Image (cartoon, grey):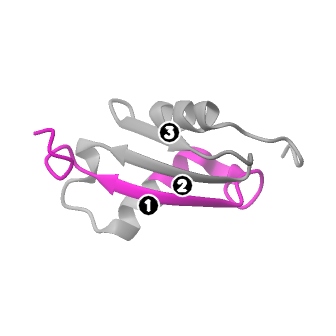
Amino acid sequence: MRWGLKLNPETIKSLIEQGLPGAGVQVSGDDGVHFEATVVSEVFAGKLPLARHRMVYATLGERMGGEIHALALKTLTPAEAGQG
């Protein structure tokens, strides 16, 4: 792990998009360790919020709890986001 390396919202957005192809991802956070993300993906259909969050955390791997101290998540299907 690269302790002390600050991530930026664009890097986190890219990691989530790589792990959940086709997802719409928005990430914000100014201090390099605390972030907020909204992830819209069809793969969330029929899944409870905890399962959805675990899917997003899996895209970030060891960075969660490491470089990323906190990630507030909003996970939606396209229909829930008003896109479908």
What residue is drawn where x is 35% and y is 35%? 24
- The amino acid marked with disc number 2 is Tyr
Label 1–label 2 contact, CB within 8 A: yes
In the current view of this chain or complex, which residue is farthest to the right? 4
Q: Nearer the viewer, residue 34 or 4?
A: 34
* First along the sequence among labels 2 and 3: 3
Image coordinates of residue 18 in percent, x first then y, are 49, 31
Q: Which numbered disc, 1 or 3, marks the residue that appears first in the sequence?
A: 3
Residue under pointer 3: 16
Q: Residue at label 1? A: 53
Q: Is residue 64 magenta-colored?
A: yes
Q: Which residue is mark 2?
A: 57
| Residue 69: quarter of image | bottom right
Task: Write the residue at 23% across / 43% down.
Answer: 42
From the top left corner, tell me how far across and down residue 3 is, in percent: 88, 49
Q: Taking 62 as reference, is 13 left or right? A: left
**In the foreground, 61 or 13:** 13
Q: Which residues are magenta?
A: 56-84
